[in-house]
Image: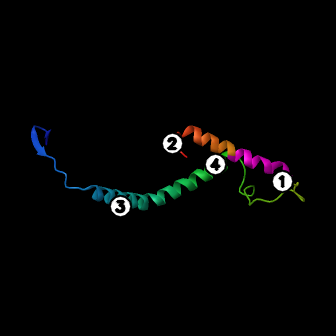
Amino acid sequence: MCVSVCQVNVPLTQDFSDATIVSLSAQVTAILTFFLARNLRIARERAWDQTLTSRGKGPEFWQPYVEEWAAPPQVDEKSWAGLEGVKGWATTFALKRSMPYSG
């Protein structure tokens, strides 16, 4: 098979196997990730700084989480426990209806 490039026939050969292409694509991905990682980190830091600035709150506002409840409210586990079975049944039913060949 030849391709016409500027009126010159250039033969195309397939010297690369599938394994070679997969290996090269993995290496190219690793190289790109290596070189772009620094720039991505800098971009994330700038985006976070701009987010804080746009919200109009100073760095003293963004502290670790502090529990505001002296005594958090108790959850009635018995009323919530029955919903787990319904949720599991509904999910299973929906998946079986959406995938006709699943068991």
Residue 55 visible from this viewpoint: no
Closer-to-camera residue (29/21) = 21
User: Residue 79: within the magenta?
Assistant: yes
Residue 94 placement: quadrant? top right
Q: Secondary structure at mark 2?
A: loop
Q: CA distance from mark 3 to mark 1?
A: 52 Å
Q: Position of residue 53 (x, y in %)?
A: 66, 49
- Amino acid residing under circle 1: Glu
**Quarter holding the N terminus?**
top left
Q: What secondary structure is the magenta-colored segment mainly?
A: helix
What residue would you read off at disc 2? 101
What residue would you read off at disc 1? 77
Specify few, some or many for label 2: CA neighbours under 10 Å numbering under 14, 14-19, or 20 or more.
few
Q: CA distance from mark 2 to mark 3?
A: 38 Å
Q: Please name which of the two marks, 1 or 2, marks the residue nearer to the observer.
A: 2
Residue at the image position 58 percent from the left and 41 percent from the top: 96
